[in-house]
Amino acid sequence: IWAHVSSPAYHASAMDGYAVRAAETITANDTQPLQLELGAQAQVVDTGDPLPGWADAVIMIEHVQPIGATHIELRAPVAPWTAVRPLGEDMVATELVLPANHVLRPVDLGALAGSGHATVNVRRKPRVAVIPTGSELITMEQVVQSGVKAGDIIEYNSIVLAAEVEQWGGSATRYPIVIDD
């Protein structure tokens, strides 16, 4: 399965905060806080929002102080791509998502959906019939009711074989003992 789309499909904010140009924050420090103008130098973003084309970092909302309705103040610079999920961080369009013959796990379903797949072709689980044979075989129920007599063999191979089939990804059906004929 190959990815139809990238995830995320755009540079996305990884935090609630303010999208900024990292280079404009370089002088911010505790003794000389920096003020940025909302709209021109900083834009409110929520987690998952696309970054404006001019922005390359996000300052967490907890790391700024609003100054009125028009500015924010910060006391530390941010590096480029801080708190940003770049386009294709999880997967890139045309990238291999799952190889052939892969047994699907819950996390794989998320990867398929995230890469633009609503459906996927799968193989049905192999169905296996387990039929114990032999006139000497008795069931566990018979053991409980009547006990084991000389010549009786408790039939448990079908339990083991069915469990192996299930462990290997198949679907097993155990049938009643078939006597020798």
Image: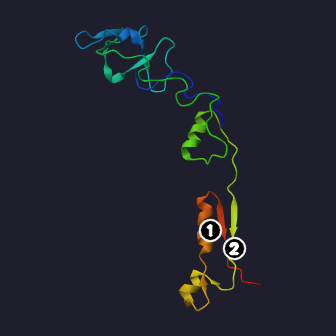
> In the drawing, what numbered circle is on residue 161?
1
Q: Secondary structure at mark 2?
A: loop
In percent of width and height, residue 36 lies at 36, 9
Is 56 displayed left or right of 136 in the figure?
left
Q: Is residue 92 above or below residue 168?
A: above
Dividing the picture into quadrants, the one containing residue 158 is: bottom right
Asked if disc 2 and disc 1 are in contact, CB closer than 8 Å, the reply is no
Q: Is residue 113 above or below residue 152?
A: above
In percent of width and height, residue 142 lies at 59, 85
Q: Nearer the viewer, residue 10 or 147?
A: 147
Residue at the extreme front of the image, as rendered: 151
10 Å crowding of disc 1: few (<14), some (14-19), many (20+): some
Residue at coordinates 71% horizontally, 83% vertically from top-left? 179
In percent of width and height, residue 2 lies at 65, 34
> In the drawing, what numbered circle is on residue 131?
2
Q: Is residue 12 above or below residue 100?
A: above
Is 132 displayed left or right of 68 in the figure?
right
Q: Nearer the viewer, residue 119 or 82?
A: 82
Instruction: Point out the tag, 2 or 1, that comes first from the N-terminus.
Output: 2
Residue 140 in view: yes
Q: CA distance from mark 2 to mark 1?
A: 10 Å
Q: Secondary structure at mark 1?
A: helix
> In the drawing, what numbered circle is on residue 77?
none
Q: Amino acid at mark 1?
A: Leu
Residue at coordinates 32% horizontally, 24% vertically from top-left? 62
Quadrant containing the N terminus in the rendered view: top right
